[in-house]
Image (cartoon, coloured by chain):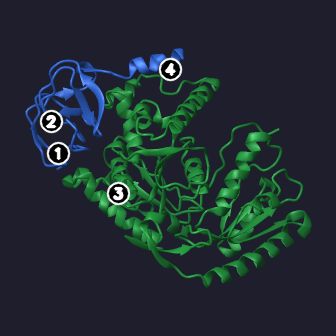
Chain colours: A blue, B green
Amino acid sequence: MRYFVVIDEKDNVATAVRDAEKGEIIETNLKQKILLLEPIPKGHKVAIRDIRANEPVIKYGEVICLARHDIKAGEHVHVHNIIDILVEQVEARKKG
Amino acid sequence: MKFNGYVRENGKVGIRNHVLVMSSVGCANTVVEKISAQTGANPITHQQGCLQLGVDQELTKKTLIGAGNNPNIGAVLIVGLGCETVQPTLLAEHIKGKRVEYITIQECGGTTKAVEKGVAIVREMQKELEKQKREPVDISHLIIGLKCGGSDTFSGLTANPVLGYVSDRLVDLGGTVILSETPGFFGGDRYLRERIVTEEGRKKFDEILNTMWQESSRLGETLADGELSPGNIKGGLTTLIEKSLGGIKKGGSRPIQGVLDFADEITGKGLWIMDTPGFDIITISGQTAGGAQMILFTTGRGSPVGCTLSPVIKVCSNSKTYEWMNEDMDINAGKIIDEGLPISEVGEELLMKMIEVANGEPTKSELAGHKEFALARVGSTL
């Protein structure tokens, strides 16, 4: 057994520590059980709660990005369905 | 919570009682190595100490003086050549509250005589230090440096958050924690900046990031340009913020009291940032020259690194490396994945380990004989 990792109790994503298939019920280190709606590759994140559009994606207890549209618990959270909030900040530094 | 340490004249507390034998210039390195080999004294050798100018020379002096002042050091022998820029006397006069001696190879009459004289001085110092006894002190006397090196996919998931948990615990217990590695701040810098409690500290934080940014540009590279590499994205990292948090979460979540320069003396309590490069042995040298008595070091691929001034506790991110390089690993954070444990459980295990190490139990890197130390540079040798 290898448990998906949730770092902080505030987090709404867990990180896969092995490749996992659609339809699997995975368990996290905090003993939450999640039905995977999509395959989750090792190192990638899965939503452990429903996240609405524009709501923060939280890992390490911090906002790492925003949801681009509604994400269901069990769905893959990655570059395809998020908004990167850092880009503007970096552009400013380059000009600056 | 208490541990047994060596209480120094200035009120600081050592968790080791080493004699340090240190080169003031690279020309003295072989003599230092020979003295260390014959006596077991902890060495510092380096490539600098001559024909360095201005701030670069000052940085070398500050770091070597800081090393001598580390509370884990009970006595210091400085070995010079005699004609170098960084004269042993310049170092010796700033190392306080302990016996400090210096010799030069030119005055001793060559290598062999310098080694003989140095060995005699060190043996005498070691006899004196044997008389000193540990006494119980509060855990708030601990100053801990944080570092990750040889990281892997799991470092940011297990080992680094474990350090974050312990950082918060130690800060709450009144101790001091030093977060470093400025290049790793890019991306997560907004989360660090908003936790700095003074305007002066925030200004200093902006300065160290800008300096690092400009230096990387000068060398023809751009640090953290806001985009993850295709490899990062394939590996599951979604934003640069997430990548940076994987490292800076070693510093936990408490307010940041201020920002120190490399090897600045650490005098405050709570969580602090020290500006250091990312290179492992330079980072821990800056932290320990600032007074850290212990380093917490996470690794995933496996690093054997230790430090000549302070014990290094190795926290491994995964069980495979923990088993494979067991002689170099102290704590297995891979259990979080294999056994399904909360971060806090391994965090408490690490805290107990820290007390044992503070009481004198050797770490794996001490048992393996690691005594690394390296100077940072800000200029060229002329």
Q: Is residue B323 visible?
A: no
Pick the front one: B181 or A93: A93
- Of labels 1 and 4, earlier in sequence is 1
Q: Nearer the viewer, mark 2 or mark 3?
A: 3
Q: Which chain carries label 4?
A: A
- Please tell me how crowded label 4 is: few (under 14), some (14-19), or many (20+) other residues with Cα within 10 Å: few
Mark 1–mark 3 Cα distance, whole angstroms, equals 24 Å
What is the quadrant of the C terminus of chain A in the image?
A: top right
- Please tell me how crowded label 3 is: few (under 14), some (14-19), or many (20+) other residues with Cα within 10 Å: some
Q: Which chain carries label 2?
A: A
SS of the residue under disc 1: loop
- Of labels 2 and 1, earlier in sequence is 1
Q: What residue is shown with label 3?
A: B169
Q: What residue is shown with label 2?
A: A48
Q: What residue is shown with label 1?
A: A28
Mark 2–mark 1 Cα distance, whole angstroms, equals 9 Å
Q: Mark 3 lies on which chain?
A: B
Q: Nearer the viewer, mark 2 or mark 4?
A: 4
- Please tell me how crowded label 2 is: few (under 14), some (14-19), or many (20+) other residues with Cα within 10 Å: many
Residue B184 lies, with reference to residue B260, above or below; the image says above
Residue A61 position in % (x across, y down): 28, 39
Q: What residue is shown with label 4?
A: A93
User: Residue at 80% across / 71% down in the picture?
Assistant: B115
Asked whether the residues under the numbered discs 2 and 1 touch, taking CB atoms below 8 Å apart as contact, a structural biologist would say yes
Pick the front one: B215 or B1: B1
**Tally of numbered discs:** 4
